[in-house]
Amino acid sequence: MSHHITEVRNLQYIYPDGREALKDVSFRIHHGESVGIVGANGAGKTTLLMLLVGAIFPCKGEVIVGEVPVVKKTLPLIRQKMGMLFQNSDDQLFMSTVYDDVAFGPRNYKLDEREVERSVVKAMETVGIEHLRDRAPYKLSGGEKRAAAIATVLSMAPDILVMDEPSTALDPKSRRRLINLLKGFSHTKIIATHDLDLVFELCERTIIMKDGRVLSDGPTADILTDLPLMEQSGLEAPLGLQNCPVCSNISRNDLKSI
Ligand SMILES: Nc1ncnc2c1ncn2[C@@H]1O[C@H](COP(=O)(O)OP(=O)(O)OP(=O)(O)O)[C@@H](O)[C@H]1O
Ligand SMILES: [Mg+2]
């Protein structure tokens, strides 16, 4: 299954209060692709990711992962293959210690306790939170919670990583660690974020969402340097590409001519 595509066909989603958050969204993501989902607040990014992993189900259209449609019946299989980092870490952490939260997924798949411990320790080391193992998640700082939530996803060793704002609340060193970690992850990555520098560094493809639709879908280097398109989407070029004497020598004029 991991070598198959993630396909979204004509997705529509209307929240119970009547808000139409997604309107006819379609795309295919191939195995190993790294795709940034960007767009202004309320564009539909989180709704889209929740539909991808079956946290909610579409009003119209379908999501297919490999040959498997994402429906209630297939959720155990989908959850094993797709790891989802939720936008709000509190949605991901509910046990009494960080260790138990990170162990929750592997235990659910009935691994023996030694294997569980191995995957938990590895995931906690990867995000640098071994020292938090016995802490209560609800007492952690925002960035510590974020790192713990990322560890809960990594401990499942998913084939497809779906992340909603992964770098939010992380300090610069933790953000860099996350970017390096994601660079080394060779499977599919689908990352919704406002951190356009992260997208520029990690994702070869970018999908821009606007008002519940796909406004643009193409190579990141083309999309994030198209200033009129970025403006139309309520976005700006990544800081690393702006005319900043500290982080870049590229000027806006250079960008226009790219
Ligand atoms: N539970 C909900 N009930 C009703 N409307 C909702 C709900 N959650 C989101 N929406 C609406 O759906 C639309 C898409 O929201 P979504 O959270 O998917 O946007 P987003 O692109 O992830 O935004 P952000 O960048 O702020 O995270 C918005 O208009 C939002 O107000
Ligand atoms: Mg969101």
Image (tube, rainbow, N blue to C red):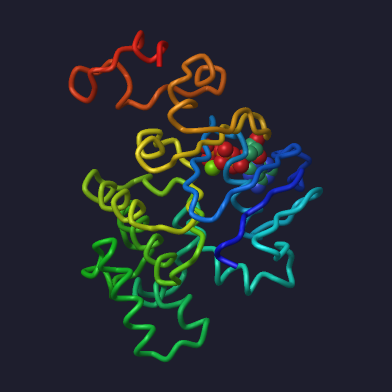
Relative depth, front residue between 181 and 40: 181
The x and y percentages for residue 178 are 31, 52
Q: Is residue 21 left or right of residue 121?
A: right
Q: Is residue 195 left or right of residue 164?
A: left
- Residue 148 seen in render: yes
The x and y percentages for residue 174 are 26, 51
Numbered disc total: 0
Quarter of the figure with the N terminus: bottom right
Q: Relative to 185, does residue 170 appear above or below in the rendering?
A: above
Q: Residue furthest left?
A: 246
Asked where in the image residue 117 lies, by quadrant, the reply is bottom left
Q: Residue furthest top?
A: 253
The x and y percentages for residue 124 are 29, 68
| Residue at 33% from the left image edge and 69% from the top image edge | 123
Q: Is residue 166 left or right of residue 1?
A: left
Quarter of the figure with the C terminus: top left
Q: Relative to 139, does residue 228 appear above or below in the rendering?
A: above
Relative depth, front residue between 214 and 43: 214
Q: Is residue 204 left or right of residue 5?
A: left
Q: Quadrant of ligand 2?
A: top right
| Residue at 79% from the left image edge and 49% from the top image edge | 61
| Residue at 48% from the left image edge and 24% from the top image edge | 235
| Residue at 42% from the left image edge and 67% from the top image edge | 152
- Residue 13 seen in render: no
Asked where in the image residue 17 lies, by quadrant, the reply is top right
The x and y percentages for residue 210 are 62, 29
Relative depth, front residue between 160 and 116: 160
Relative depth, front residue between 118 and 131: 118
